């Protein structure tokens, strides 16, 4: 039985139930190619931003990073490639964001590192009520 090919609009978007990481990687790489964006580290201060991802003659695999720290937000404007060195220096590396992001179908909420203040991000339908968006608070931690 063959699998149905997903439309990129169903992959590169915010979703409370996102596709697999490898699917997001593949569709993001294809999207970048269509936009004429080369495979590189997207950190402008990195040496690999302007040159090929090679180290000691071997290709470096770029790491897909979610800029806002929410793994469910796969919109192209929220994704970037980083070289392993740039990725290792992020504060969100190794679970640094764990418990700070709460998702629901209408958007998500991101808490400060101290957990006191949260910023609500509504995505999609502009007619969503504040109560619907606030239902992020009832979501499970770390999703």
Image (cartoon, grey):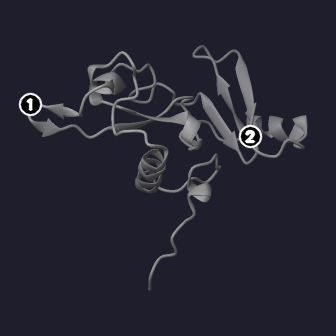
> What label does residue 56 carry, if any?
1
Among the 4 quarters of the image, the one containing residue 119: top right
- Counting from the top left corner in percent of width and height, residue 62 is at 32, 38
Image quadrant where residue 90 sits: top left
Q: Earlier in the sequence, mark 2 or mark 1?
A: 1
Q: Position of residue 31 (x, y in %)?
A: 49, 49
Would you call the spot at circle 2 few (<14 residues within 10 Å), some (14-19), or many (20 or more)? Answer: some
Q: Residue furthest front?
A: 36
Of residues 76 and 137, the one nearer the viewer is: 76
- Mark 1 and mark 2 in contact (Cβ < 8 Å)? no
Question: Residue at left 27%, top 20%?
Answer: 47
Q: Which residue is mark 2?
A: 123
Task: Give the number of marks.
Answer: 2
Residue placed most toward the observer, 109 or 54: 54
Helix, strand or loop status at disc 2: loop
Identify the residue at image location x=71%, y=16%: 117
Q: Residue 79, percent across and down?
A: 50, 37
Q: Secondary structure at mark 1?
A: loop
**Compared to 86, does 35 lie above or below?**
below
Please give left or right for residue 105 compared with residue 41 in the image: right
In the figure, is residue 54 to the left or right of 34? left
Q: Residue shown at 67%/40% (left/top)?
A: 103
Residue 124 is marked as none
């Amino acid at each position: 039985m063959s699998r149905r090919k997903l439309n990129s609009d169903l992959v590169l978007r915010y979703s409370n139930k996102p596709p697999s990481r490898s699917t997001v990687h593949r569709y993001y790489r294809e999207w970048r190619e269509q936009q004429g964006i080369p495979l590189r580290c997207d950190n402008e201060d990195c040496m690999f931003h302007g040159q090929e991802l090679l180290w000691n003659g071997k290709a470096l695999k770029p790491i897909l990073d979610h800029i806002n720290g929410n793994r469910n937000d796969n919109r192209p404007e929220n994704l970037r490639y980083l070289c392993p060195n740039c990725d290792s220096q992020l504060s969100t590396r190794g679970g640094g964001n764990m418990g700070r992001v709460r998702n629901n179908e209408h958007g998500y909420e991101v808490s400060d590192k101290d957990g006191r203040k949260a910023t609500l991000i509504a995505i999609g339908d502009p007619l969503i009520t504040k109560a619907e968006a606030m239902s992020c608070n009832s979501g499970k931690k770390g999703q």
